[in-house]
Image (spheres, helix red, strand yellow):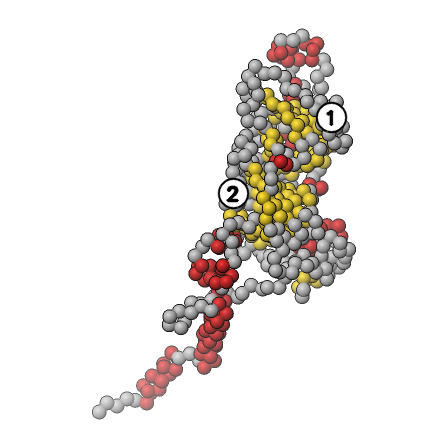
Amino acid sequence: MIRISSCFVALLLATYSLALPAVGDFQRRRWKVDDLEARTDEASSATGTSTATGTSPPAASATTPLISLDPNNPVWDSTFTGPFDAIRGELGATIIGPNNPNIAQENPDAFAPPTTDGGSVPNFKWPMSLSHNRLQTGGWARQQNVNVMPIAKAMAGVNMRLKPGAVRELHWHSTAEWAYVIKGSTQVTSVDQEGRNFISTVGPGDLWYFPPGIPHSLQATGDDPEGSEFLLVFNDGSFSEDSTFMLTDWMAHVPAEVLAKNFQLDVKEFADVPARELYIFPADVPADDQPAPESPFGTVPEPFSFALSKVPATQFSGGTAKIVDSTTFKVSVTIAAAEVTVEPGAMRELHWHPTEDEWTFFLEGEGRITLFASGSNAQTFDFQAGDVAYVPASNGHYVENTGNTTLHFLEIFNTDRFADISLNQWLALTPAPLVKAHLGFSDETISKLQKVKPVVVGPGLFNNSTNSS
């Protein structure tokens, strides 16, 4: 018969007791399991999904909390007069220090961001109203480039105004120039590298495009008593209007005898050449039917202007859109664009552009953009007419009309073809079980996803009223 000492039995009991979890710890672990099972059962019941064995795959809530369905509208609109405090619901507090009410009124989502914002996103808003204006006798010009908005590396913009007859002097750029006429009409001229010339009058809502290095001029007509105003876009974020190659600037920096030799003229013929660039200067209003000088090489094979205003817009539930790229405006091989309108309460759908950054210019109305930059980084900015937005390639975003009038803007890209990916279409064309596993959608919800891009969607079922409290 084997005898076991009482000391050895005590040692075994102590070892066994250490191997078991404490009662409190066991209860805490069991609570987590019960909670997981309860939430999984609840989610399965809500979606009506089950397997042959009566069990369901884990719902999204088993892995992470569910999103909030509380509204995140701007906390005030353009009619609100204050006080402008950094408060959203129970979050934030009043501002008791200095505050700029004019900036606050236009930027409610900066003062009290949606609770869905998170992380850090580089500034992607620039108001042209903050750009330094270059004033000339014939008009003015202001610009946006990486100096004022560092994120905008692929494109830069210039807003220019010419009085009737005023000329943006003969010049050229090392980049392409794409333009949209905002008001009035502009007569443009050009000569290409083969000696073929071009002249055209470009009206409101129409475009011109000059390839890199091609010389051209811009002159406001007398069609509008105020002259012309237009937007210029260049496919280089570091572009500067102050670094343009200009006719008078070059000739002022060439010795007079060299000018005489080059043109085979008497040196006295150059006595009236300006000693400095003219840039924007007054001149007589050009004739409506002014012809280009006859060239022995003819005219350019593809026109440098495009009548976008005459292109029918595609109607969607929340607004309109029309696209222009090299498939329609043949010569525009480095710039593609979309002109979009969004009605009050509607939005340019959730989407992204696969490979190209988006340079956006707001022509009319008020709106906001939330930019999703991956890694839980998202930020919302508010925009008004005259503002520039910049969205890097593949960053998810939407454009929502937060005002009471039509929102009108341009989406511009450094590419020959317009391209975007619709979140709605992507989900509609993905196998339903995958979408259900990610988002917990029911079969009925899946059936409402759209296989054709909605592009601009109406207000929908959610009440989007602004809370000014």
Q: Is residue 254 above or below residue 110?
A: above
- Res. 254 image quadrant: top right
Q: Residue at x 55, y 45 (%)?
A: 392
State the residue lying farthest toward the left: 1
Percent of width and height locating residue 252: 67, 19
Percent of width and height locating residue 404: 71, 52
Left or right of residue 121, residue 355 in this image: left
Question: Dot 2, crowdedness within 10 Å: few (<14), some or many (≥20)?
Answer: some
The amino acid type found where label 1 is placed reads Gly
The amino acid type found where label 2 is placed reads Ala
Q: Residue at x 51, y 38 (%)?
A: 417
Q: Is residue 253 above or below residue 433?
A: above
Q: How far apart in space, not on screen, are marks 2 and 1 (Cα)?
A: 38 Å
Question: Dot 1, crowdedness within 10 Å: few (<14), some or many (≥20)?
Answer: many
Percent of width and height locating residue 233: 61, 35
Q: Residue at x 72, y 62 (%)?
A: 469
In this orientation, does residue 26 appear?
yes
Which residue, given by chain and number where applicable, does mark 1 sit on? Answer: 165
Left or right of residue 403, residue 413 in this image: left
Does label 2 or label 1 sit earlier along the sequence? 1
Percent of width and height locating residue 360: 61, 43
Mark 2 element type: loop
Which residue, given by chain and number where applicable, does mark 2 sit on? Answer: 419
- Res. 22 image quadrant: bottom left
Mark 1 element type: loop
Along the viewing direction, whichever of 335 and 87 lies nearer the viewer:
335
Tell me the quarter of the image containing the N terminus. Answer: bottom left
